[in-house]
Amino acid sequence: MEYRKVTAIILDERLEDVEKALIKMRVPGVSVSQVRGYGKYHNFYEKDMMCRHARLEIFCPASEAEAIAQCIIDTAHVGMSSDGMIAILPVEKLYRIRTSSELCADDAD
């Protein structure tokens, strides 16, 4: 089975709504971390121009990656240059630490 990694950087204020939408979509797992940085949008009120965002990382079957990305876009979008971005990357291998085994098509949990 092919896997993808969906990485999204979104506004902190949209995180709770995005989490609820992903749970409603039955996404089985997500990692969230707080990040700082800037891209096209700069926070001119900060000395270093950095903005606070949330980073979500989701490993999923390739067939679900686009739907997950679209769910995040639909929920996180507010129409500002600071909305964030999403990347979908191929995953060469995925291992479950608990079982020391590579995940395959019949791994449901």
Image: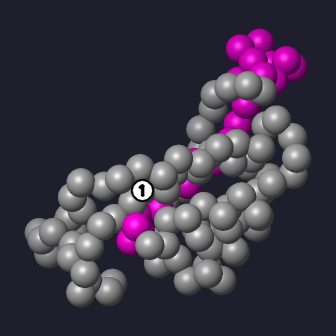
Residue nearest the observer in this picture, 88 or 103: 88
Residue 104 x/y as whole percent: 21, 76
- Percent across and percent down for residue 67 are 59, 70
Residue farthest to the left? Answer: 100
Query: What residue sits right under mark 1 in the picture?
Result: 5
Residue 107 image-quadrant placement? bottom left
What residue is drawn where x is 30% and y is 67%? 2
Q: Quadrant of the C terminus?
A: bottom left
Indicate yes or no whether the magenta region holds residue 38. Answer: no
Question: For the magenta stretch, what is the residue range?
Answer: 42-62
* Magenta stretch: includes residue 57: yes
Callout 1 secondary element? strand
Residue placed at 24% from the left, 87% from the top?
106
Q: Is residue 7 above or below residue 72?
A: above
Residue 93, can we see it?
yes
- Identify the residue at horizontal 77%, vertical 64% (top origin): 75
Is residue 33 positioned above or below 44 on the image? below
- The location of residue 37, given as percent across then percent down, is 64, 28
Residue at image position (56%, 83%) is 26
- Taking depth in this image into account, of 89 and 9 the one nearest to the observer is 89
| Residue 16 visible, this orientation | no
In the displayed structure image, the side of residue 8 where residue 74 appears, left or right: right
